[in-house]
Amino acid sequence: MASSLADAFKGAGFRLALVGGPVRDAILGKLGNDLDFTTNAHPNQTKKILQSWAESVWETGIVFGTVAGKRGETTVEVTTYRSDSYETQSRKPEVKFGDSIEADLSRRDFTINAMALELTEGAPIFIDPHNGLSDLGKKIIRTPTTPENSFSDDPLRMMRSARFASQLNFAIADEVLLAMKNMCGRISIISAERVRDELTKIIMSPNPRLGITILVETGIAELVLPEIPKLQLEIDEHHHHKDVYEHTLTVLEQAMAYENRLGGANLVIRLAALMHDVGKPKTRALIAGGGVSFHHHEVVGARLTKERLKTLRFDGNTVDDVATLVALHLRFHGYGDGEWTDSAVRRYVRDAGELLTHLHVLTRADCTTRNKRKAESLALTYQSLEERIDELMEKEELSKIRPDLDGEEVMRLLQLKPSRAVGDAMDFLLELRLERGPLGTGLAEIELLKWWTTRKQN
């Protein structure tokens, strides 16, 4: 596929090279169907060539020199050689097209992404002016130019370094880490959407702990996700408590181990695991004689989570789902020794709604005690809760909990027109259903009339 595209560009008198991530991935044995190329053809010339080669073409990024196309199962992006940069306080680059692939490679983010395979000069020619192949072998992340220059051009590259470390399990060169620490404040000029996308890639990587740790240690997290470094609470000899930051990273890893229950890697559960305790710093209180409490940290945490995810421009469903899980993550600990009533189980299921399996995963992941006996006891207790839920689910269809009477039946029985009173009656019937289970129409009508009589008397 790449060779036929190269022939099309060569036939039009232009050069074409496979570049960046696909070259890196091919060396690592991971080449996929999304290929990036660079060319000396200008965007409109590229568009014309792709229109004759691809089955579909789109030009969303043409202002930045990129035209994309798809042929069969392969998607390609072809970008004109570039030599652009950012102004000091700008969020958008000043796009400048270049005339050599070497200059184009020198402006790329990391040496492991600054390799190319020229395809229009007869046999393919491997181009590696910044020793990316060597760094790939050493599993280290460096920049083609000085990291200061690279991060000045695009500060998001600081987060990208943490992302590649997480995705590839690579180390970041010392000079790159130092520049990240010294220049972390520059991340503030990057749009929330771009920050969100890089953060998501870190969280969804095989090793998010590594990327998050890098963001925290370089000071970048303080600007893009400040709730996480704040979890590094001071621990003194008199008021002992778990290291909340370390606990959080462990919960994230343990949640990942249960993701098969959610069908695979899941952004909502990973965000919930990362944010579940962010309310603790604001609710921390010292207990006389030693100890620490975090009363209602789940409530505060849900509010902080919603605010942060909105600031990062996550979509509304993700914001609501993650905040709901943070708010509910302590509910299980009211389960005691397993003596929950059917009513409590129904409410647990009702409140979790479609996030019930997510809540199961988060609750199980939230056990990080090193006490083996305690951990086994908690796991058995939660297993019994899940079994209770399954039993009631089969018996009562808990996922479809609703009052035994509908609005029309309530208005007929109580001789009401649509009004707030009808809503109050429906709320009463729902609480009754949660408390006592399915009653049937006859008993529900009797209980509703009793409630209505008492309400009118009061």
Image (tube, rainbow, N blue to C red):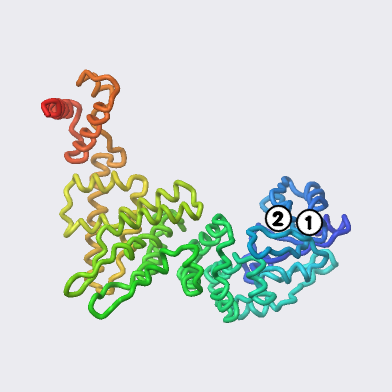
Q: Is residue 187 left or right of residue 446?
A: right
Give the answer, above or below, for where 51 lies relative to 272.
above
User: Where the N terminus falls, by quadrant?
Assistant: bottom right
Q: Is residue 36 left or right of residue 198?
A: right
Q: Is residue 330 left or right of residue 220?
A: left
Query: Considering depth in this image, is 330 or 290 the residue closer to the camera?
Result: 290
Q: Please name the residue shown 64% across and 67% down the image.
A: 25
Q: How many marks?
A: 2
How far separated are the C-alphas under marks 2 and 1?
9 Å
- Provide residue 406's location: percent of width, then percent of height: 27, 27
- Provide residue 219's location: percent of width, then percent of height: 49, 71
Q: Secondary structure at mark 2?
A: strand
First in sequence: mark 2 vs mark 1: 1
Q: Secondary structure at mark 1?
A: helix
Image mark for residue 228: none
- Toward the front, the furthest residue is 89
Q: Which residue is mark 2?
A: 76
Kind of residue sitting beneath label 1: Leu
Q: Which residue is mark 1?
A: 5
Look at the numbered discs 2 and 1 and tell me whether their residues touch, using CB distance below 8 Å: yes
User: Where the C terminus falls, by quadrant?
Assistant: top left
- Provide residue 69's location: percent of width, then percent of height: 72, 50
Give the answer, above or below, for where 407 lies relative to 383.
above
